[in-house]
Image (cartoon, helix red, strand yellow):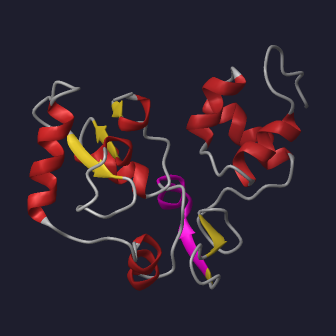
Amino acid sequence: MKEIIQNSLKPEHIVVLYTVQHLSCSQIAPVAGISRQRVWKILRDQGINTGRGEGGATRIKYDCDFCGKEGQKTRAVWRKSAKHYCTKECYFAAIKNPGYHQWRHGLRIARQIVSQCFKFQENNIIHHKDGDNRNNEKSNLAVYKSQSEHMNYHRGGKAQPVWDGRNIYN
């Protein structure tokens, strides 16, 4: 018996959310306006195996964003990051910045320069856009709310700085 889904997504859309965006039944349910069990039944009726065993959908295949090698991850792990790497070596190679020049004193100078235009909070992090800590031009500096926001930016996330030196006119 197939029920008509009122005020919810079509079964085809629910299949896309599950198979392409890799959302769980619990994540799809509030979006579709139905229960988690109903999402599971719709997927089953559409021929989608949600089981953990052979042919199940708990592990997905992906291509490494650095080397292109095929790998597998669980759906939950895959959803946690925007980019996917097959090994730690690929991850570190992808985030390596060849223009980075470590200079601890450069960070201190940058904080002094930024503090003239922006009031720092305790956890704020200075970011040099070109990776060169010796380049302390205001247009090269940005401030992130926390280290996690800063790393989110470096990993391709949508983190926005709380202060950006490009918006300051000398």
Nearer to us in this view, 31 or 136: 136
Q: Position of residue 40 (x, y in %)?
A: 69, 42
Nearer to us in this view, 147 or 134: 134
Choose top left, top right, bottom left or bottom right for residue 132. Answer: bottom left
Report the number of discs.
0
Q: Residue at x 42, y 49 (%)?
A: 153
Q: Tell me if 60 is positioned left or right of 5 in this view.
A: left
Tell me the magenta residue range.
71-80
Choose top left, top right, bottom left or bottom right for residue 65. Answer: bottom right
Q: Residue at x 43, y 40 (%)?
A: 159
> Relative to residue 153, is residue 119 depicted above or below?
above
Q: Position of residue 148 (x, y in %)?
A: 28, 47
> Relative to residue 73, is residue 105 depicted above or below?
above
Q: Tell me if 164 is positioned left or right of 104 in this view.
A: right
Residue lying farthest front?
170
| Image quarter (top left, top right, bottom left or bottom right) of the C terminus | top left
| Residue 18 falls inside the magenta stretch | no
Q: Residue at x 72, y 43 (%)?
A: 17
Q: Position of residue 68 (x, y in %)?
A: 65, 82
> Relative to residue 3, is residue 98 depicted above or below?
below
